[in-house]
Image (spheres, rainbow, N blue to C red):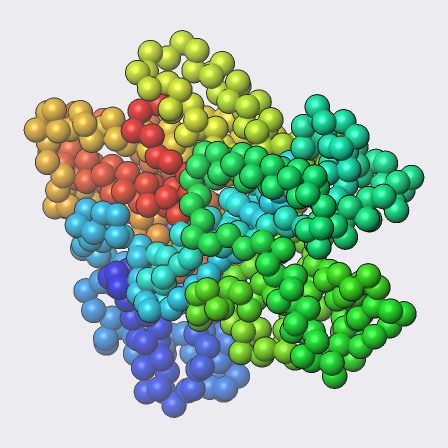
Amino acid sequence: MTMTRNMHEEIKILIQNALKNMDITANDIHIEHPTDFSHGDYSTNIAMRHASQAKKSPKELAEELVGELQKKKGDDIDRIEIAGPGFINFYLSKSFFAKNIEDILKEKGSYGKDEILEGKKTIVEYTDPNPFKEFHIGHLMSNSIGEAISRIVEFSGAEVKRANWQGDVGLHVAKTIWGKIKNPKMSWGDAYAYGSQQYEENKKEINEINKKIYEKSDSKINLLYEEGKKESLAEFEKIYKQLGTKFDFYFFESEGGPIGLEIIKKHKKIFEESDGAVVFHGEKFNKTLHTRVFITKEGLPTYEAKELGLAQMKYKKYPHDISIVITGNEVKDYFRVVHKAMEQTFPEIAEKTKHIPHGMLRLPSGKMSSRTGDVISVEDLLNDVRERVLEKMKDSDLLEKEKIAEQVVVGAVKYSILKQATGNDIVFDFEKSLSFEGDSGPYLQYTYARTHSIIEKAHENDIVSSTELVTESTTEIEKLLYQFPEIVLRARVEYEPHYVTTYLTQLASAFNNFYAHTRIIDSGNSAPHSVAITEATSIVLKNGLGLLGIEAPEKM
């Protein structure tokens, strides 16, 4: 565990002990970083929250508490001050910041890690594209969020396995194969769109194909099915590689369906027959839930039944402590019903399951639907972004221009997704996403490349990093660097990568401001310290970008 996190806990313990000496019990001590650095490095409102208990005004309690805190504050805290109606602000010492820089330079890629989840087996399910359909920008949302959460959880010491759940059976497959039979020259994506458009007029024929797919009773349909599935999965693998994801397990609905049916048959008291179908009355267990069909009148498993099968398949394949499922917001209510059914059938797995719904990714033109064929594929989006990136780089003489452009493309798209809270919808803005001026993936990548270039020049000039204090002031960068482990911890606890994204943007801004006002290499006696700050920034930027699944190019 890093020194920084201990510092955060140390202040909490310091406050708890001081309150104990004053006969005041506080179970929840809230400490935060003031937005204005002039108000300290940590701040607490504890005096205002417990003033009535102490029968004193907040300011009186704060003064008494600060007196107690001063006795045991240690060398890492420079001073403690009271502000406003009773806020208590802690200012860390110059030696603390120097030691933190030393920690970063020593720990490098491990800086920010902790061991809180050491030994915890975690399975994260995300992306979940369906064979026979386009890999569209909704899957890109799931993939970016899922990969970032997987990396953040791993950074806390957990063993993480990545899982992909794919719909290789269902009406969408029947529609696609029907479309392909009618027009063999169509792509699989076009065949699906055509089958969807023509479904109402050809329902009986397409439903019959759907039944034959489940039964595997028609050799021609079986051949088309295997061909389409193989081609789809191969295309998906190319996209996963491009996005920097490698899955450990692939689960398919064709496998989950039969298992789901068996689960439902074994729990007849939980599932009930209704008009020939089998349903789960969610509202019987929770008034906010509703009824959903788990087996159709035709005896086929629905998505709900397959989800039950999947939960068991995951646990059998990889007995885990935590199961994280990442899907779009549109299935949030549906998943709540499924989870309640899981609680009734296998509560030990349900207890381990955490659902994280995400918003929708849109282009300025609006929402896209694969049912109508009006769908934006990931391939199309990335190609469009790539063209714009290469246009921006047309005058560059970089040797690996194509490789760097690819890193910038993926970084731009992932940042746009990960900069907002997971549940929010996102409109992808091409200009903002590719800006080198701030609040974008390329801005962070460019800042990292800048730090790398400065470090190389320092080595050429035989300047060695040093944390020896040569100035009286502490830079804004130093006041941000030590916060990184806390930010990572918060992102992991809340499953919200956007905390890391926001922090990195703030750090990059602070560094670029430092760069604009400091002659880093040519700063005489200050050069080793300035280079140490640059090197620490470089390490933290790379670690943070890595958690987001974004590459850190050394040249741009």
Residue at the (49%, 38%) spot, across then down: 237
Q: Position of residue 328 (x, y in %)?
A: 65, 51
Q: Nearer the viewer, residue 62 or 537?
A: 537
Name the quadrant containing residue 430: top right
Q: Nearer the viewer, residue 70 or 108?
A: 108
The relative height of residue 37 versus residue 13 in the rendered view (above or below) is: above
Residue at the (33%, 62%) spot, across then down: 157
Q: Position of residue 496 (x, y in %)?
A: 51, 55
Residue at the left extreme?
462
The relative height of residue 186 versus residue 176 in the rendered view (above or below) is: above
Q: Nearer the viewer, residue 26 or 71?
A: 26
Q: Position of residue 327 (x, y in %)?
A: 61, 53
Residue at the (48%, 20%) spot, across then down: 389
The relative height of residue 498 versus residue 324 in the rendered view (above or below) is: above
**Residue 477 visible in the displayed image:** no
Q: Position of residue 163 (x, y in %)?
A: 49, 54
The relative height of residue 490 versus residue 236 in the rendered view (above or below) is: below
Residue at the (60%, 45%) spot, across then down: 129
Residue 134 falls left or right of residue 391: right
How many marks can you see? Answer: 0
Q: Nearer the viewer, residue 321 or 182?
A: 182
Q: Quadrant of the C terminus?
A: top left
Q: Quadrant of the N terminus?
A: bottom left
**Residue 108 visible in the displayed image:** yes
